[in-house]
Each structure stands twice: as structure tokens, then as C-alpha cells.
Amino acid sequence: GNSVTQMEGPVTLSEEAFLTINCTYTATGYPSLFWYVQYPGEGLQLLLKATKADDKGSNKGFEATYRKETTSFHLEKGSVQVSDSAVYFCALRGSGNTPLVFGKGTRLSVIA
Amino acid sequence: NAGVTQTPKFQVLKTGQSMTLQCAQDMNHNSMYWYRQDPGMGLRLIYYSASEGTTDKGEVPNGYNVSRLNKREFSLRLESAAPSQTSVYFCASTPAGHPNTEAFFGQGTRLTVV
């Protein structure tokens, strides 16, 4: 079945550092890929998405590129801020009207 | 727009008690989902309803039942709560005919079973 593997956390970075959170997936067909963010005490919000190979999703300075050859969708940001501290989830949605499948989440803490 | 609304936001139950978690969406979405979130486990699918009148089991359905009351509402019932069901529960929805769209989430229900 479909599955998502993302890097274990927690990740602690200083403000303005470069961020990478790795995400790889296993799926049949051509899934859509998503990054969600969860701020403390809140629900999940969509951060960005990509629906086909080589698409790049971007939002709020975050980027991720759908790499079918490496089955990856790594999240990057060039300069993190304290306000980026949150839990980040990689997810995929397979072909057809199927539910989202999530990775285990990566907690990011950014210190000033 | 309210989006996806879950009630209650917090609940404490004693082992063996029952309760129903409510979820409603006002986006005219066809599909609705219940997930649970546990530390180190990410979000796991409990049940989902692809359309009004249908429900299907997800990854962790044991101990739960669901009802798709109408297009807007999808409830999750715990008949006899157990400490292992202590978790944060999220309801989500997606529109019909758009398999590549994201899911929209409620704010969650934090449930503690003692």
C-alpha cells in the first residue's frame, strides 16, 4: 500500500539557518504530494502541494519538488524564523478518491 | 466560512464510558475522514466516508463506529472508551471530483480516557 517516510525529529535550528526535512514515499500510480504544518494547539494547515512529477510547490518561503525518480518530496527553507516552529507532516494522496496517508511528522524548533 | 468544525474540543472520559465526537463541514465536500494523532505515530486513519451513505474502515478502526448523518456531518463514536484511545482526533474533508486536492482539517478534539 501507499506509505510515507519522513525524517525523525526533533530538529532544532538557529534563526536564519537552512532547513531540510526529508520525505520519501511508496505509491502505485501517480500520487499527489503535500506538506502540512501544525502549530502548537492547532489543527493541520496545508503548507504546499505538488500534483505531478517535477512540480515545485512553494509557500511562505518553503519549497518542495516532486521527484518521481527518487520518490521524494523534501521540504526546504532558506532562512527559518522562530515563527516556523511547528510540526511538519509529509502526506500523499493516491490515484482516485483515496484518503491522505501521512508520515509521522517532524517537530521543528527554531531558537533566536 | 467555518470550514470543518469539531465538538467538543476537550473531553475526559472514564474507562468504559461512551461518547460521540461530532464533525460538520460547510464546504459542500463529498468525502469526510476521521484521523487520530499520537506522539511519534503521525496521523492514522480510523474511518472515512467517500460520499453520503458510505463508510469504510481505515488503518485503526477497532473500538470505533461512525455515522455519516448527511452530507455535512460525520460523527465518530466510542462505545466503551479505553485508555489506549487517549489521543487527539481530527476530522477532515475533501471535495468530490478532485482527487488531487488537499484535505481540510478541523481544530481537533483532545480526548483523555482515565
Image (cartoon, grey):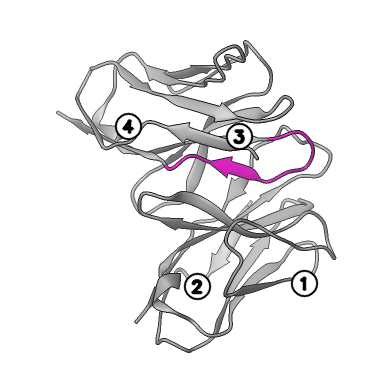
Q: What span is in magenta?
A: A94-104
Label 4 resides on the chain identified as A
In this picture, is B10 found above or below A85?
Answer: below
| Amino acid at the residue labelled 3 | Leu
Read off the residue under disc 4.
Answer: A84
In this picture, is A25 found above or below B18?
Answer: above
| Amino acid at the residue labelled 4 | Asp
Q: Are dots 1 and 2 on a single chain?
A: yes
Q: Is residue A6 left or right of residue A14?
A: right
Q: Position of residue A19 (x, y in %)?
A: 32, 20
Give the mark, 1 or 2, whose residue is nearer the N terminus. Answer: 2
Using the numbered discs, state the Cα–Cα distance from disc 3 to disc 2 in whole angstroms. Answer: 28 Å
Q: Are dots 3 and 4 on a single chain?
A: yes
Using the numbered discs, state the Cα–Cα distance from disc 4 to disc 1 in whole angstroms. Answer: 38 Å
Q: Position of residue B27 (x, y in %)?
A: 72, 51
| Amino acid at the residue labelled 2 | Pro
Read off the residue under disc 3.
Answer: A92
Residue at the left extreme of this rendering: A112
Read off the residue under disc 1.
Answer: B69
Label 1: how many Cα within 10 Å (few below 14, some 14–19, many 20+): few
Q: Nearer the viewer, mark 3 or mark 4?
A: 3
In this picture, is B14 found above or below A100?
Answer: below
Using the numbered discs, state the Cα–Cα distance from disc 3 to disc 1 in whole angstroms. Answer: 28 Å
Judged from the image, the secondary structure of the residue bearing numbered disc 2 is loop
The quarter of the displayed image where residue B64 is located: bottom right
Using the numbered discs, state the Cα–Cα distance from disc 4 to disc 2 in whole angstroms. Answer: 28 Å
At 46% from the left and 26% from the top, the residue drawn is A23
Judged from the image, the secondary structure of the residue bearing numbered disc 3 is strand
| Amino acid at the residue labelled 1 | Leu
